[in-house]
Image (tube, helix red, strand yellow):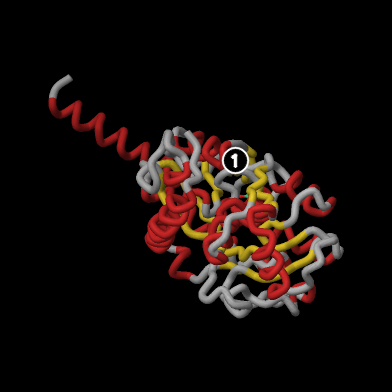
Amino acid sequence: MNKFWRCGAGLALLASASLAFAEFPDKPVTLVVPFAAGGPSDKIARDLAEALRKPLGQTVIVENAAGAGGTIGSTKVARAAPDGYTLLLHHIGMATAPALYRKLSYKVPEDFETLGLINEAPSVVIGKPMLAANNFAELRQWIASNGGKVNLAHAGLGSASHLCGLMFQSALKTSMTPVPYKGTAPAMTDLIGGQVDLMCEQATNAVPQIEGKKVKVYGITSLKRLPLPSLKDAPTLSEAGLADFNVQVWHGLYAPRGTPPAVLAKLNAALRVALKDPDLIKREEALGLTVVSDERLEPAGHRKHLEAEKARWSKVIKDAGEYAD
Ligand code: MLT
């Protein structure tokens, strides 16, 4: 092939590639959730998938790839074709996995394109229903006198409840006995049944149990109280004496590294429309979630937040000495 023809063929290839991106998406998009079906992240993903359908003009299929604190699903997306058809919805665990897992098969943030944050979800400190303490001051007293005998449930290494529990112990300057479960559902079942004492769980999962009076609530982990009827008397931990305590689980949307800019722009535009959907906002607010500010909806704002959270948590995790090989 001479130079002229080679150049012509190259231009034709480029033109057909940009045409393909212009038509994106022309088939269903898969949204990988790295946690089990029925859990808090899955719930958010299913609501978001529905809200994305209209702006994308395509169905968004939720796929649960659970295990190893979200790292199995994240690995899957890091290795997927960077064409915009495989996305990842992940929570704060995206920022903490590099400190928690010694052998991680992907790099954060390098192996992903950040598409924008989705929401922030405060957690709540909840206790088994038969616990004698009726408020945070009494709980603190009870923890102080029982020390390492207090059981603290969590949904597995790298889960939001694990991370919040680490921060809670560090703020109280105490160590409890961690009880890891394989997910939020069995941890909550044992808390309700009284087999474990406490858990620091995402409001998304805890609010229905608080409303049903199946667990006791002691405090909210964000700096603002939650405007939900079942939490109207629950103080923030900061108000209750743990100055500046602030743990927010946040969710973000990701694509594999190398996804073309035109596709990323379309996905970000669709995410912005989806997050203004009144039905989605109503459903999120009922669970104590808040949709993020416009600045964090930008890929760059999302990346900045991810990097700041990675730095903040790596110290907490290092101090706690909890990691997996
Ligand atoms: C889930 O959806 O199972 C949770 O977000 C897991 C967790 O607590 O981190």
Q: What's the residue at 69%, 52% (across, down)?
A: 151
Instruction: Give percent across and percent down for residue 36.
Output: 68, 41
Q: Give the mark count.
A: 1
**Residue at far left of view:** 3
Residue 178 at what x, y percent from top left? Answer: 63, 48
- Does residue 233 lie above or below 80 as drawn? below
Residue drawn at x 67%, y 63% is 143
Q: Residue at x 52, y 54 (%)?
A: 92
Amino acid type of the residue that numbered disc 1 sits on in the rendered structure: Pro
Q: Classify 10 Å Cα crowding around label 1: few (below 14), some (14-19), many (20 and above).
A: some
Q: Mark 1: which secondary structure?
A: loop
Can you see residue 113? yes
Quarter location, residue 306:
bottom left
Reading the image, the residue beneath label 1 is 28
Residue 81 left/right relative to 274: left
**What residue do we see at 19% from left, 32% from top?**
7
Answer with left or right where residue 288 lies relative to residue 307.
right
Q: Position of residue 66 (x, y in %)?
A: 62, 37
Relative to 143, 116 lies left or right: left
Say which of 152 and 181 sits in front. 152
Along the viewing direction, whichever of 243 and 223 lies nearer the viewer? 243
Quadrant where the image shows the N terminus:
top left
- Res 279 visible: no
Which of the two residues, 140 or 234, is positioned nearer the viewer here?
Answer: 140
Task: Please name whichever residue, 242 or 111, is drawn nearer the observer in this view of the structure.
Answer: 242
Q: Residue furthest top?
A: 1
Q: Is mark 1 within 8 Å of ligand 1?
A: no
Q: Residue 208, position in %: x, y? A: 80, 61
